[in-house]
Amino acid sequence: MSEFFLHSFNTLSHGLIGYIIPFLFVLTVVVFFHELGHFLVARWAGVKVLTFSLGFGPELAGFNDRHGTRWKISAIPLGGYVKFFGDDSEASTPSPEMLASMTEEERAGSFHCKKVGPRAAIVAAGPIANFLLAIVIFTCLFTFFGKPSTTARVDQVEAGSAAAKAGFQVGDVITTINGKAIGSFSDMQRVVGIRAGEQLTFTVKRGDSTLQLRGTPELREIKDPFGNAHRVGVLGITRKTSVGDVTTERVDPATALWLGVKETWFVIDRTLAYVGGVFTGREAADQVGGPLRIAQISGQVATIGVAALVHLAAVLSISIGLLNLFPVPLLDGGHLLFYAIELVRGRPLSDRAMEMGFRIGLGLVLMLMVFATYNDILHLAAS
């Protein structure tokens, strides 16, 4: 067992320099905009913000703005927080002693003395900022780099595959799947990849004829160019690319914005489908990763180019936004759950009930972190 962990450590340490800078770039961008969402809406709602921190632990550098907010960079770069007036901790738990001793003027600037609506808006602003950041990134990528595509042409059919059983032939061009237009081979792969075991109807152009084929993608484990394993739906067809096959469609800003929204929704939909699949047993939980996996992927993607790394930041931003919306005390979604209960009851939960909720939430978050880190170690050891 000691050799196993030593190998995992060596695997990570060998690529530490190549991983750490891209990792910090991606994580810092995502965390900054998440906390900025909380911060801006809090300022709009008249809440006094004491601290805006990137990272946790001891302060490395910082300054005070004219409103009295301490902006700082802390030693542990694995997150961040905004601390409001009246908070007892970085998780925005209330301080009963401070609340009880506040003057009316101080209560007006305290997060916990605001009505449910402003509090909910401040909490929800973090995840919303993550989704908006992703839309902006995708929009900029489509605007400046265009939309690359290759025709969804079948150049090879694997014997015995789902495509062979469905009747696909070399030269077929897929134009729609279940009535949805397919503009490129990657569009086809996306649709097929998330629908393993589901029968799909393909509209295919074969020479001068148009016909419909029905096929059921098979769930397979494939590896990306970096050797990372993924379980996706596969038809068993191959597209060979040659010079001139890949085209880049230039799009106007309005179209780029629409494509950015669609791309963001695709990532949200796929992430939720995966989480649902884990709970139903359809998906394996070993794809859940933590900081080590993110660091590794960031380093790998950085070798492709800046655009790919920025694209990863958008995907991670969406994931962080969704994770924070889960109804787990300690996360933003847990706070929103408490506010929903408060609306129904007409009064907040008791201090003891909220304390118990935060303890349970802390336990669940720590369990998730341990599980994700365990997966990361297994993944690194296997790579």
Image (cartoon, rainbow, N blue to C red):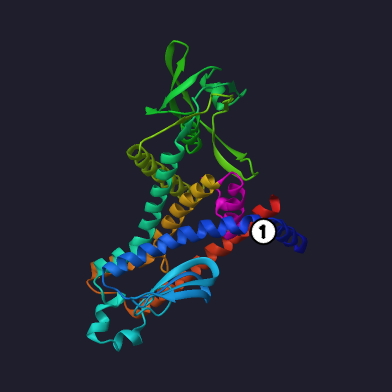
Q: Secondary structure at mark 1?
A: helix
Residue under label 1, please give it. 16
Q: Residue at x 46, y 32 (%)?
A: 187
Residue 265 in the image: state x and y as whole percent.
39, 45
Q: Is residue 238 above or below residue 316?
A: above
In the rendered view of the protein, which quadrant contains the N terminus? bottom right
Based on the displayed image, in which of its 4 quarters is residue 261 positioned? top left
Q: Residue at x 65, y 53 (%)?
A: 379
Rate crowding at label 1 as few (under 14), some (14 to 19) or many (20 or more) other CA atoms within 10 Å: some
**75 or 131: nearer the viewer:** 75
Q: Residue at x 36, y 78 (%)?
A: 68
Residue 25 in the image: state x and y as whole percent.
53, 58
* 150 part of magenta stretch: no
Q: Is residue 95 in view from this perspective?
A: yes
Q: Is residue 283 in view from this perspective?
A: no
**76 or 117: nearer the viewer:** 76
Q: Is residue 301 above or below residue 9?
A: above
Residues in magenta, as a range:
282-305
Task: Count how many numbered circles sit on residues in the image.
Answer: 1
Based on the displayed image, in which of its 4 quarters is residue 205 positioned? top left
Residue 244 in the image: state x and y as whole percent.
54, 24
- Look at the magenta stretch and give its main secondary structure: helix
Q: Is residue 23 above or below residue 344?
A: above
Q: Does residue 148 appear to the left or right of 335 in the view shown? A: right
Q: Residue furthest right?
A: 3
Q: Does residue 6 appear to the left or right of 363 in the view shown? A: right
Q: Residue furthest top?
A: 208
Q: Amino acid at mark 1?
A: Leu
**252 or 53: nearer the viewer:** 252
